[in-house]
Image: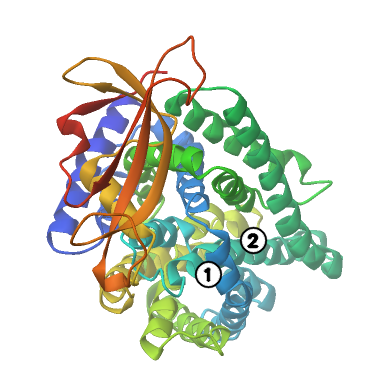
Amino acid sequence: MAFSIAIIIIIGLSGDYLFKQIKLPGLVGMLLVGICVGPFGFHLLAPEMLTVSADFRKIALIIILLRSGFELRRDALHQVGRAALIMSCLPAVFEIIAVMVSSVWLLKITWLEAALLGTILAAVSPAVVVPLMIEFMDRGRGAKKGIPTLLLGASSLDDVFVIVLFTVFLGIGQEGEIHILSKLAQIPVSVISGILIGLFSGYVLYRLFSRFDWRPPKRTLIVIGFSILLTQLEVISEPYLPIASLLGVMALGFIILEKSEPIAHIISQKLKKLWVFAELLLFVLVGAQVNIQVAWKAGLAGTVVILIGLVFRSLGTWLSLYKTPFTRMEKIFCVVAYVPKATVQAAIGAVPLAAGFAGGEVILAVAVLSIIITAPLGAIGIKILGERILDHGSQSLYYFKELRKKLELPHAGERVRHKKSGKVWKIIEEKEVWLDKATGNFQTLSSDRQIPAIYIRYWRDSRQKKNGRGKTISQYYSNQSASFNDNWEILYDW
């Protein structure tokens, strides 16, 4: 398996680099690498790697959903809440109905099998959408109207809605009869329970992190561990209480951000570094699930079914954005962002075949074909349109992220060492402020005369004194400042 991981790292990074060189999303390159090195390509991955593939993909998905949780601010959620709720179900309903009708006619399968195919195809891929939205948020794109936040929340709720419908239709086929209303009632129950459990877990972690001065790597690993436990809790409680654990993962990050931005920023930065490897695992292994030969069997009819579904899905997305402040081009961007399929289709596409449905092979073929068609096209469309359409905002909070990245600044709670004196200091306060562009002084001005800056206060780290007592120093860092690493180094000890 070690050789397989080496293959994923070396060839996956190469695919990522090549596609970025031609101004396309790197994840498309990683997906294609997965197809080539997987069991249906050149078979370079060991069987045991494929055996644990689902677990690796789940951990990678947890990391990116945690990152999205640490980016969700309450004001942004309030701004897009109504639209996110409607987008979580209306586009999927439109696509399911369109796929059902067209697949019965074109693919010659039963209505029940068509319903299963519709629910499989209707799930948008958070694995594709979420990383791209976070990338835009990191650069302040779409911050003014909260478009990336809208798509983060809606895509996660969309999966919950669609998967519950899938289990309803699957149960009808296996059991002959099923209490449909009780199953549909699981949708709001699973959403609410998932969010509540995530909020509770996040609050517990916030209290622990506030009480114990654990180093950033430890905090990050604990957060990931709790998140994995949340997904396992969903499996354990399934017969008794449905839980949307992935929503819980996002809620966990959200509550820590609400309670303590410094702690949230530190953990988010560590997750960002972990995502480099997790992203490789996720997209290469998703690509490895794609069977080109099976997809080929779907042929022209399968392609037409997928395209018909996308047309009606786009109509549903457009209607979901009715009475929102978005421009026509911003609505088009949201429509394109709701196109990619990958994660859910790879996970449940083969379930009807395993359950003994006569049309199971056809369903699997169309599900695989949908990944091949929509994941690359959707990712490319999101990247190109996002760069052209999403606003930068006047005083976006994400300007501070660009500043942090450029100057490599530390966060509150981290320890730093002065390179010249060798003395160790601890960051006990940080604030995001706007300074006078001409003088560098802190004051309230019109936005065109302001520049973003970060105020940092250092405390001489001494085990005999409490934080904030004794000698402290402070400094403002802006685009006019030298890099933090010129004079300081961050101590990444445990």
- The image shows a total of numbered marks equal to 2
Badge 1 element: helix
- Residue type pointed to by label 1: Leu
- Going 51% across and 46% down the picture, which residue do you hit? 66
Residue 164, position in %: x, y? 70, 62
Tell me if residue 411 comes above or below residue 199 in the rendering: above
- Going 36% across and 45% down the picture, which residue do you hit? 279
Q: Is residue 430 left or right of 219 when viewed as pictured? A: left
Residue 358 visible in the shown view: no
* Foreground pick, 101 / 481: 481
Residue 279 visible in the shown view: yes
Whole-angstrom CA distance, mark 2 to mark 1, is 14 Å
Tell me if residue 225 comes above or below residue 58 in the rendering: above
Quadrant location of residue 395?
A: bottom left
Q: Which residue is mark 2?
A: 160
Badge 2 element: helix
N-term mark: 2 or 1: 1
Residue 140, position in %: x, y? 34, 64
- Going 78% across and 67% down the picture, which residue do you hit? 184
Quarter holding the C terminus? top left
Using a 10 Å C-alpha cutoff, classify the residue at mark 2 as few (fewer than 14 neighbours), some (14 to 19) or many (20 or more).
many
- What colour scheme has been applied to the protein in the rendered image? rainbow
Q: Is residue 203 left or right of 385 when viewed as pictured? A: right
- Residue type pointed to by label 2: Val
Please tell me the numbered disc located at residue 176: none
- Going 22% across and 43% down the picture, which residue do you hit? 407
Which is closer to the viewer, label 2 or label 1? 2
Using a 10 Å C-alpha cutoff, classify the residue at mark 1 as few (fewer than 14 neighbours), some (14 to 19) or many (20 or more).
many
* Foreground pick, 238 / 448: 448
Residue 133, position in %: x, y? 40, 62
Q: Residue furthest top?
A: 464
Q: Which residue is mark 1?
A: 121
